[in-house]
Amino acid sequence: MSKIIRQLAVASGLTAGVLGASPALAAGTAAGSTITNTATLNYQVGGVAQTSINASNNITVDRKITLTVAEVGSATTTVVPGSSAQVTSFTVTNSSNDTIDLGLTAAQLSGGTAAHGGTDNFDLTGLSMFVDTNSNGTYDAGTDQAATFLDEVAADASRTVFIVGNVPLGRANADVAGVTLVAQARAGGSAGSQGAVITETTGANTAGMDTVFADAAGPASGDAARDGKASDDDDYTVSAPTLTVTKQSRVVSDPVNGSTNPKLIPGAVVEYCIVVQNAAGSASASSVTISDPLPAQTTFVAASSFLNGTYTGSAPTGTCNLDGTAGGSVASGTLSGTLGTVAAGTTRTLYFQVTIN
Protein backbone atom coordinates (compact mmCIF):
# COMPACT_ATOMS: atom_id res chain seq x y z
CA MET A 1 0.00 0.00 0.00
CA SER A 2 1.27 3.46 -0.90
CA LYS A 3 1.99 6.19 1.63
CA ILE A 4 2.39 9.80 0.43
CA ILE A 5 5.07 11.44 2.51
CA ARG A 6 4.79 14.92 1.08
CA GLN A 7 2.99 16.42 -1.87
CA LEU A 8 2.95 19.90 -3.37
CA ALA A 9 1.36 21.20 -6.54
CA VAL A 10 3.22 24.17 -8.02
CA ALA A 11 3.20 25.25 -11.66
CA SER A 12 6.95 25.08 -12.17
CA GLY A 13 9.68 22.69 -13.47
CA LEU A 14 9.07 19.06 -12.21
CA THR A 15 11.64 16.26 -12.28
CA ALA A 16 11.28 12.68 -11.04
CA GLY A 17 13.72 9.91 -10.04
CA VAL A 18 13.66 6.38 -8.73
CA LEU A 19 15.86 5.51 -5.77
CA GLY A 20 16.58 2.37 -3.81
CA ALA A 21 15.62 -0.29 -6.44
CA SER A 22 16.91 -3.85 -5.67
CA PRO A 23 18.95 -5.76 -8.25
CA ALA A 24 16.92 -8.20 -10.37
CA LEU A 25 17.24 -11.96 -9.85
CA ALA A 26 15.68 -14.84 -11.77
CA ALA A 27 13.19 -15.17 -8.90
CA GLY A 28 12.60 -11.42 -8.92
CA THR A 29 13.08 -8.76 -6.27
CA ALA A 30 13.30 -10.28 -2.81
CA ALA A 31 10.06 -10.49 -0.86
CA GLY A 32 9.80 -7.87 1.87
CA SER A 33 12.03 -5.43 0.04
CA THR A 34 11.02 -1.75 0.16
CA ILE A 35 10.90 0.10 -3.14
CA THR A 36 11.12 3.88 -2.64
CA ASN A 37 10.11 6.31 -5.38
CA THR A 38 11.00 9.97 -4.81
CA ALA A 39 9.93 12.91 -6.97
CA THR A 40 11.79 16.24 -6.70
CA LEU A 41 10.10 19.61 -7.38
CA ASN A 42 12.31 22.54 -8.43
CA TYR A 43 10.92 26.06 -8.91
CA GLN A 44 11.84 29.76 -8.99
CA VAL A 45 10.34 32.94 -7.54
CA GLY A 46 11.22 36.16 -9.35
CA GLY A 47 13.97 34.36 -11.16
CA VAL A 48 15.51 33.14 -7.94
CA ALA A 49 15.78 29.36 -7.47
CA GLN A 50 14.04 28.13 -4.36
CA THR A 51 14.65 25.13 -2.11
CA SER A 52 13.60 21.86 -3.77
CA ILE A 53 10.63 19.93 -2.39
CA ASN A 54 10.55 16.11 -2.40
CA ALA A 55 7.63 13.68 -2.34
CA SER A 56 8.33 9.98 -1.68
CA ASN A 57 6.31 6.78 -1.99
CA ASN A 58 7.23 3.40 -0.41
CA ILE A 59 5.90 -0.01 -1.45
CA THR A 60 6.67 -3.43 0.01
CA VAL A 61 7.44 -6.27 -2.44
CA ASP A 62 5.10 -9.19 -1.87
CA ARG A 63 6.14 -12.85 -1.81
CA LYS A 64 5.63 -14.95 -4.94
CA ILE A 65 5.73 -18.69 -4.17
CA THR A 66 6.68 -20.93 -7.04
CA LEU A 67 8.59 -24.21 -6.86
CA THR A 68 9.27 -27.22 -9.02
CA VAL A 69 10.07 -30.90 -8.56
CA ALA A 70 11.59 -32.75 -11.51
CA GLU A 71 12.93 -36.28 -11.83
CA VAL A 72 16.60 -36.49 -12.75
CA GLY A 73 16.91 -38.07 -16.17
CA SER A 74 14.09 -39.37 -18.30
CA ALA A 75 14.16 -43.13 -17.87
CA THR A 76 12.88 -45.69 -15.43
CA THR A 77 15.18 -47.15 -12.77
CA THR A 78 15.87 -50.77 -13.67
CA VAL A 79 15.93 -53.10 -10.67
CA VAL A 80 16.10 -56.81 -9.95
CA PRO A 81 13.92 -58.77 -7.53
CA GLY A 82 15.19 -58.73 -3.96
CA SER A 83 17.53 -55.76 -4.48
CA SER A 84 17.83 -53.16 -1.71
CA ALA A 85 18.48 -49.41 -1.54
CA GLN A 86 17.24 -48.72 -5.06
CA VAL A 87 17.26 -45.02 -5.93
CA THR A 88 15.27 -42.50 -7.92
CA SER A 89 16.50 -38.89 -7.97
CA PHE A 90 14.66 -35.57 -8.07
CA THR A 91 15.68 -31.92 -8.31
CA VAL A 92 13.67 -29.62 -6.04
CA THR A 93 13.94 -25.92 -6.97
CA ASN A 94 12.73 -22.87 -5.07
CA SER A 95 11.89 -20.29 -7.74
CA SER A 96 10.19 -18.03 -5.19
CA ASN A 97 11.54 -14.59 -4.33
CA ASP A 98 12.10 -15.60 -0.71
CA THR A 99 14.08 -18.11 1.32
CA ILE A 100 11.71 -20.86 2.44
CA ASP A 101 11.61 -24.38 3.83
CA LEU A 102 10.24 -27.14 1.64
CA GLY A 103 8.36 -30.02 3.25
CA LEU A 104 8.88 -33.36 1.51
CA THR A 105 6.53 -36.32 1.07
CA ALA A 106 7.28 -39.55 -0.79
CA ALA A 107 4.33 -41.61 -1.93
CA GLN A 108 3.72 -44.71 -4.03
CA LEU A 109 1.25 -45.02 -6.85
CA SER A 110 -1.73 -47.27 -6.37
CA GLY A 111 -2.26 -48.70 -9.82
CA GLY A 112 -2.56 -46.66 -12.98
CA THR A 113 0.02 -45.74 -15.58
CA ALA A 114 3.50 -45.06 -14.27
CA ALA A 115 5.75 -42.18 -15.34
CA HIS A 116 7.52 -44.11 -18.09
CA GLY A 117 4.72 -46.38 -19.20
CA GLY A 118 3.55 -49.69 -17.84
CA THR A 119 1.05 -50.20 -15.06
CA ASP A 120 2.02 -49.75 -11.43
CA ASN A 121 1.51 -53.15 -9.78
CA PHE A 122 3.71 -53.31 -6.68
CA ASP A 123 5.11 -51.21 -3.86
CA LEU A 124 8.64 -50.89 -2.62
CA THR A 125 9.37 -51.64 1.01
CA GLY A 126 11.25 -49.36 3.39
CA LEU A 127 10.54 -46.24 1.31
CA SER A 128 12.53 -43.25 2.57
CA MET A 129 13.93 -39.87 1.45
CA PHE A 130 17.50 -38.57 1.57
CA VAL A 131 19.05 -35.20 0.77
CA ASP A 132 22.20 -35.09 -1.37
CA THR A 133 24.35 -33.93 1.52
CA ASN A 134 27.64 -33.77 -0.37
CA SER A 135 26.02 -32.37 -3.55
CA ASN A 136 27.60 -34.94 -5.88
CA GLY A 137 24.32 -36.02 -7.48
CA THR A 138 24.77 -39.64 -6.39
CA TYR A 139 23.15 -41.40 -3.45
CA ASP A 140 25.83 -42.26 -0.91
CA ALA A 141 24.59 -44.52 1.88
CA GLY A 142 25.89 -43.37 5.23
CA THR A 143 26.69 -39.89 3.93
CA ASP A 144 23.45 -38.51 2.53
CA GLN A 145 21.06 -37.73 5.35
CA ALA A 146 17.47 -38.87 5.72
CA ALA A 147 15.12 -35.89 5.65
CA THR A 148 11.47 -34.89 5.67
CA PHE A 149 12.10 -31.30 4.64
CA LEU A 150 14.65 -29.02 2.99
CA ASP A 151 15.89 -26.33 5.33
CA GLU A 152 16.34 -22.67 4.36
CA VAL A 153 16.31 -23.01 0.57
CA ALA A 154 17.33 -19.67 -0.91
CA ALA A 155 15.60 -18.06 -3.86
CA ASP A 156 16.66 -19.72 -7.14
CA ALA A 157 18.42 -22.54 -5.26
CA SER A 158 17.99 -26.27 -5.99
CA ARG A 159 18.55 -29.41 -3.94
CA THR A 160 18.73 -33.07 -4.98
CA VAL A 161 16.44 -35.48 -3.14
CA PHE A 162 16.63 -39.26 -3.38
CA ILE A 163 13.75 -41.69 -2.89
CA VAL A 164 15.21 -45.01 -1.75
CA GLY A 165 13.43 -48.34 -1.35
CA ASN A 166 13.75 -52.11 -1.53
CA VAL A 167 12.33 -54.39 -4.21
CA PRO A 168 10.44 -57.42 -2.89
CA LEU A 169 11.79 -60.81 -3.86
CA GLY A 170 9.69 -62.67 -6.37
CA ARG A 171 8.62 -59.74 -8.58
CA ALA A 172 8.27 -60.69 -12.23
CA ASN A 173 9.93 -59.20 -15.28
CA ALA A 174 8.42 -55.83 -16.35
CA ASP A 175 6.63 -55.25 -13.01
CA VAL A 176 6.48 -51.53 -12.24
CA ALA A 177 6.48 -49.50 -9.03
CA GLY A 178 5.65 -45.81 -9.38
CA VAL A 179 6.79 -43.22 -6.82
CA THR A 180 6.00 -39.53 -6.35
CA LEU A 181 7.88 -36.76 -4.57
CA VAL A 182 5.87 -33.78 -3.31
CA ALA A 183 7.39 -30.54 -2.00
CA GLN A 184 5.32 -27.96 -0.09
CA ALA A 185 6.27 -24.37 0.68
CA ARG A 186 6.84 -23.67 4.35
CA ALA A 187 8.04 -20.60 6.21
CA GLY A 188 11.79 -20.24 6.54
CA GLY A 189 13.85 -18.26 8.99
CA SER A 190 14.59 -20.79 11.72
CA ALA A 191 17.52 -22.97 10.70
CA GLY A 192 17.24 -26.61 11.65
CA SER A 193 13.46 -26.74 12.14
CA GLN A 194 10.64 -26.99 9.65
CA GLY A 195 8.51 -23.87 9.36
CA ALA A 196 4.73 -23.70 9.19
CA VAL A 197 2.87 -24.27 5.91
CA ILE A 198 2.69 -21.01 3.97
CA THR A 199 -0.80 -19.79 3.09
CA GLU A 200 -1.79 -17.43 0.31
CA THR A 201 -3.02 -13.93 1.13
CA THR A 202 -6.70 -13.47 0.38
CA GLY A 203 -8.52 -10.23 -0.36
CA ALA A 204 -7.01 -6.87 -1.26
CA ASN A 205 -3.34 -5.99 -1.24
CA THR A 206 -2.08 -4.93 2.19
CA ALA A 207 0.69 -2.65 3.34
CA GLY A 208 2.80 -5.59 4.49
CA MET A 209 4.31 -8.54 2.63
CA ASP A 210 1.48 -10.51 1.04
CA THR A 211 1.86 -14.02 -0.43
CA VAL A 212 0.84 -15.16 -3.90
CA PHE A 213 1.03 -18.77 -5.10
CA ALA A 214 2.20 -19.14 -8.70
CA ASP A 215 3.06 -22.85 -8.93
CA ALA A 216 1.75 -25.14 -11.65
CA ALA A 217 -0.27 -28.32 -11.09
CA GLY A 218 1.76 -31.51 -10.68
CA PRO A 219 1.04 -35.21 -11.23
CA ALA A 220 0.62 -36.08 -7.55
CA SER A 221 -2.89 -36.49 -6.21
CA GLY A 222 -3.96 -33.21 -4.64
CA ASP A 223 -1.25 -31.12 -6.30
CA ALA A 224 -3.30 -28.41 -8.01
CA ALA A 225 -2.17 -25.17 -9.59
CA ARG A 226 -1.46 -22.33 -7.15
CA ASP A 227 -1.50 -24.46 -4.01
CA GLY A 228 2.08 -23.95 -2.83
CA LYS A 229 3.09 -27.49 -3.84
CA ALA A 230 5.07 -29.14 -6.60
CA SER A 231 5.48 -32.80 -7.53
CA ASP A 232 6.84 -35.25 -10.06
CA ASP A 233 6.71 -39.00 -10.69
CA ASP A 234 9.35 -41.59 -11.39
CA ASP A 235 9.28 -45.38 -11.40
CA TYR A 236 11.16 -48.61 -11.00
CA THR A 237 10.90 -51.39 -13.59
CA VAL A 238 11.84 -54.95 -12.72
CA SER A 239 14.23 -56.76 -15.00
CA ALA A 240 14.08 -60.46 -14.18
CA PRO A 241 14.33 -63.81 -15.90
CA THR A 242 11.10 -65.59 -16.76
CA LEU A 243 12.14 -69.17 -16.16
CA THR A 244 10.18 -72.36 -16.63
CA VAL A 245 11.46 -75.80 -15.72
CA THR A 246 10.08 -79.03 -17.07
CA LYS A 247 11.23 -82.62 -16.68
CA GLN A 248 10.55 -85.38 -19.12
CA SER A 249 11.54 -89.06 -19.32
CA ARG A 250 11.87 -91.79 -21.94
CA VAL A 251 12.63 -95.49 -21.62
CA VAL A 252 15.70 -96.30 -23.69
CA SER A 253 15.98 -100.08 -23.32
CA ASP A 254 15.08 -103.03 -21.11
CA PRO A 255 16.81 -106.39 -20.52
CA VAL A 256 14.13 -108.35 -22.44
CA ASN A 257 13.26 -106.18 -25.46
CA GLY A 258 16.46 -104.21 -25.81
CA SER A 259 15.83 -100.92 -27.57
CA THR A 260 12.84 -102.21 -29.54
CA ASN A 261 9.63 -101.13 -27.84
CA PRO A 262 11.28 -101.23 -24.41
CA LYS A 263 9.20 -101.32 -21.24
CA LEU A 264 9.71 -99.90 -17.76
CA ILE A 265 10.70 -103.14 -16.07
CA PRO A 266 13.51 -103.71 -13.56
CA GLY A 267 16.80 -103.31 -15.36
CA ALA A 268 15.35 -100.88 -17.89
CA VAL A 269 17.39 -97.76 -18.74
CA VAL A 270 15.49 -94.48 -18.48
CA GLU A 271 16.72 -91.11 -19.66
CA TYR A 272 15.63 -87.91 -17.94
CA CYS A 273 15.85 -84.43 -19.41
CA ILE A 274 15.44 -81.33 -17.28
CA VAL A 275 14.65 -78.35 -19.52
CA VAL A 276 15.21 -74.75 -18.39
CA GLN A 277 13.70 -72.08 -20.62
CA ASN A 278 14.01 -68.28 -20.27
CA ALA A 279 11.34 -66.33 -22.14
CA ALA A 280 12.23 -63.78 -24.78
CA GLY A 281 12.40 -60.21 -23.51
CA SER A 282 13.44 -61.26 -20.02
CA ALA A 283 16.70 -60.65 -18.20
CA SER A 284 19.42 -63.26 -18.26
CA ALA A 285 19.51 -65.69 -15.36
CA SER A 286 23.00 -66.25 -14.02
CA SER A 287 24.56 -68.92 -11.81
CA VAL A 288 21.77 -71.34 -12.72
CA THR A 289 22.16 -74.68 -10.95
CA ILE A 290 19.97 -77.78 -10.80
CA SER A 291 19.78 -80.39 -8.07
CA ASP A 292 17.73 -83.54 -8.51
CA PRO A 293 17.40 -86.16 -5.75
CA LEU A 294 17.45 -89.52 -7.52
CA PRO A 295 14.52 -91.86 -6.75
CA ALA A 296 15.45 -94.69 -4.38
CA GLN A 297 14.13 -97.23 -6.91
CA THR A 298 16.77 -96.18 -9.46
CA THR A 299 20.52 -96.26 -9.88
CA PHE A 300 22.43 -93.49 -11.67
CA VAL A 301 24.24 -94.61 -14.82
CA ALA A 302 27.84 -93.51 -14.45
CA ALA A 303 29.06 -90.73 -16.78
CA SER A 304 25.59 -90.35 -18.30
CA SER A 305 24.94 -86.70 -17.40
CA PHE A 306 25.36 -83.88 -19.94
CA LEU A 307 24.87 -80.14 -19.45
CA ASN A 308 23.66 -77.34 -21.72
CA GLY A 309 22.55 -79.44 -24.64
CA THR A 310 20.14 -78.18 -27.26
CA TYR A 311 16.45 -78.92 -27.29
CA THR A 312 14.30 -79.47 -30.34
CA GLY A 313 10.70 -78.33 -30.19
CA SER A 314 8.89 -77.06 -27.14
CA ALA A 315 8.91 -78.61 -23.71
CA PRO A 316 7.60 -80.93 -22.51
CA THR A 317 6.99 -82.71 -25.83
CA GLY A 318 10.24 -81.86 -27.62
CA THR A 319 13.45 -83.80 -27.92
CA CYS A 320 16.45 -83.49 -25.65
CA ASN A 321 19.55 -83.74 -27.86
CA LEU A 322 22.68 -85.48 -26.63
CA ASP A 323 25.03 -82.69 -27.67
CA GLY A 324 25.84 -81.04 -24.36
CA THR A 325 29.00 -81.12 -22.31
CA ALA A 326 29.70 -83.99 -19.97
CA GLY A 327 29.26 -82.77 -16.42
CA GLY A 328 27.29 -82.94 -13.23
CA SER A 329 27.98 -85.00 -10.16
CA VAL A 330 26.12 -87.28 -7.74
CA ALA A 331 26.56 -86.90 -4.00
CA SER A 332 24.38 -88.37 -1.25
CA GLY A 333 21.91 -89.58 -3.86
CA THR A 334 21.44 -86.15 -5.48
CA LEU A 335 22.52 -85.22 -9.00
CA SER A 336 23.76 -81.61 -9.31
CA GLY A 337 24.72 -79.63 -12.39
CA THR A 338 25.56 -76.03 -13.25
CA LEU A 339 24.05 -74.46 -16.36
CA GLY A 340 25.71 -71.06 -15.89
CA THR A 341 23.84 -68.22 -17.62
CA VAL A 342 20.54 -68.76 -19.39
CA ALA A 343 19.94 -65.76 -21.64
CA ALA A 344 16.53 -64.49 -22.69
CA GLY A 345 14.93 -66.63 -25.37
CA THR A 346 17.24 -69.60 -24.82
CA THR A 347 16.91 -73.15 -23.49
CA ARG A 348 19.40 -75.18 -21.48
CA THR A 349 19.19 -78.84 -20.45
CA LEU A 350 20.51 -81.36 -17.97
CA TYR A 351 20.36 -84.90 -19.38
CA PHE A 352 21.13 -88.13 -17.47
CA GLN A 353 20.21 -91.83 -17.29
CA VAL A 354 19.20 -94.23 -14.53
CA THR A 355 18.33 -97.91 -14.37
CA ILE A 356 15.26 -99.21 -12.60
CA ASN A 357 16.22 -101.37 -9.63
Image (cartoon, rainbow, N blue to C red):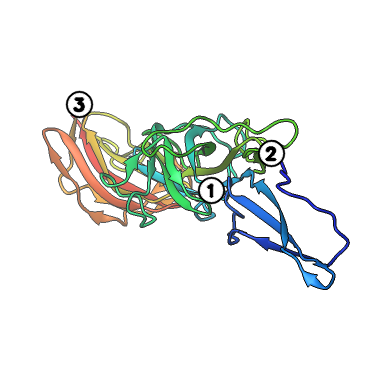
Between discs 3 and 2, the one toward the N terminus: 2
> Is residue 267 something that shows in the picture?
no
Q: Measured from the top left, where is residue 11 in percent x and y?
A: 88, 61
Q: Residue furthest left?
A: 332
> Comparing marks 2 and 1, which lies closer to the viewer?
1
In which quadrant of the rendered image does the N terminus lie? top right
Kindly identify which residue carries mark 2: 225
What residue would you read off at disc 1? 94
Q: Amino acid at mark 1?
A: Asn
Secondary structure of residue under mark 2: loop
Q: Is residue 205 above or below residue 322?
A: above
Pick whichever of labels 2 and 1 is earlier in the sequence.
Answer: 1
Q: Is residue 193 above or below residue 329?
A: above
Q: Is residue 237 left or right of residue 332?
A: right
Q: Residue furthest front?
A: 46
Q: Residue at horizontal 43%, vertical 35%?
A: 171
